[in-house]
Image: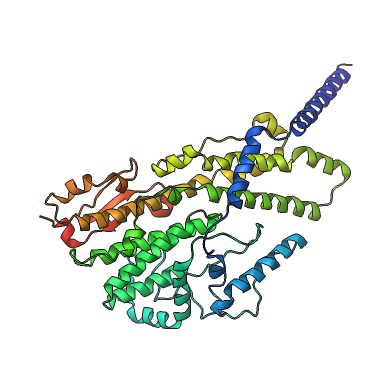
Amino acid sequence: MIVRRLLLWAGITVLGIVTLFVVNVGVHRLAGLDAAQREAMVTLADVRAAPREGRNAFALLWLMPYDVADADIERLAADDVREANARVVAGRPLGDLAPADRPRLAALTHADPGLCRAREHGCLAHVRSNQEATRALVATQARRLARLRTLEQRDYYHYAFPHAPDMPIPAVDPIQRLELSALALDFIDGDRAEAIAGVCRNIATWRRLRHGTDSLIFSMMAVAYVGVAIDLAGDMLAESPIAEPVPAECGEAFAPIAEADVDFCSEAAGESAFAAAVSDDLVARDRSENPRGPLERALFSLTYDREQTSATRALALAGYCSAEQRARSLADGDGPPPRAGAGPLACAANLVGCGFDMASVDPYEDYRERLLDMAAKLRLGATVLWLRETRDDPRPLAERFAARPEHLRSGTRATGIGDDGRSIWVANLDTRKFGERTTLALAPPVEASP
């Protein structure tokens, strides 16, 4: 008798829980998106659809490794985009999008001894120690170098392929190391002014192309490229006489940080679309690989709501587009925007979607910190220029550095002069990627100022 009652109450409890679960799902599905979710989705959609002025660098970077006529680059890239769109519609992969018989330029490998080393400070020193290897590399890569420098005529980077889990990534070759190696060789060969101007044009180009990009991968690539170019510019200036004029191009490269330099909104909008594509692909793949009966399909529909998943993700990512977050970034303030995730009941009505959301949103603050570190490094480079310009100031270096203008400072970060008095440094936020500090050399006459 007792067992029967226990089983009865257990059955009633389970039925009650299931009923509450179904009712909760129904309430949230019938209610649809709330005003904040709809606004977030509109915000990110508007950012993705915003018109861009000038010439897109996408085609040039996509076809950078290929031995095709420069006049055909835009046409061939457009053909590839059409093919990619057709494949996505047909459910076909994008991994082998480029035709196998498309000719390639001379191979460029990361291990080439003529290239500056990746993630190492000292491009100039490396090329000086490997001049013949760099000279041979520059000769064999003349076409790629010429094509690289046409990037200076591009205005922005918009990813033109459709979002998909296996979407192709342009420009995976060590193209930045190639260009900087060539410029370092020019400097060593005595063409110092043009070499410094070339590095500064390079900094300004990648800085500009990153503005408003919808590709997180490209954004972080540009951040890294700007960083290594600043290192080389600093080393070149450190070896240049203090009275030697700095090329005008460096004024653009190290112009005061603007909102566009640290704005993460467009990357967030692009990631929202990419995450949606990944979620759709996972669901479609699961359905095709694991056929289920009516009961299992019904259960899945109760635990996954595509619209709510996209809206919840948009609500979190749209925080990067707020005026408050943009102002915080411009002031070099770290910290993510307030997390506007789904509440417990809403999450219970979309268990699978909440899992997607938790897996796809949290890491983005690390990327924004890299933007802020790039901006801090640009300010540090601008400080090197300012110290050269104010070389006649009779105060000691420490006093001059402490009195630098506000636009050369990065919030409340720790910063200072190296122990040897021959460098200046600023602390990094992303210490895993860039180390504890960013350090730039000073020209010897600077620290010896009377």
Q: Quadrant of residue 178?
A: bottom left
Query: 252 or 410, which lies in front?
Result: 252
Tell me if I can see residue 95 in this picture.
no
Q: Quadrant of the C terminus?
A: bottom left
Instruction: Say which residue appears at 21% left-offset and 45% top-offset.
Output: 403
Q: Is residue 315 above or below residue 418?
A: above
Which percent across, then down, holds residue 407? 31, 47
Which percent across, then down, holds residue 300? 79, 42
Q: Split into 4 quadrants, where in the image is the N terminus?
A: top right
Establish if 5 lies above or below 434. Answer: above
Which residue is most to the top? 1
Q: Nearer the viewer, residue 83 or 166?
A: 83
Query: Which residue is painted at 26% across and 64% down in the image?
Result: 246
Q: Compared with residue 28, is residue 40 higher up or lower down, i.e. above or below?
A: below
Which of the pair 165/207 is nearer the observer? 207
Residue drawn at point x = 83 percent, y = 20 percent: 9
Q: Position of residue 43 (x, y in %)?
A: 60, 43
Please say whether residue 217 is visible from this viewpoint.
yes
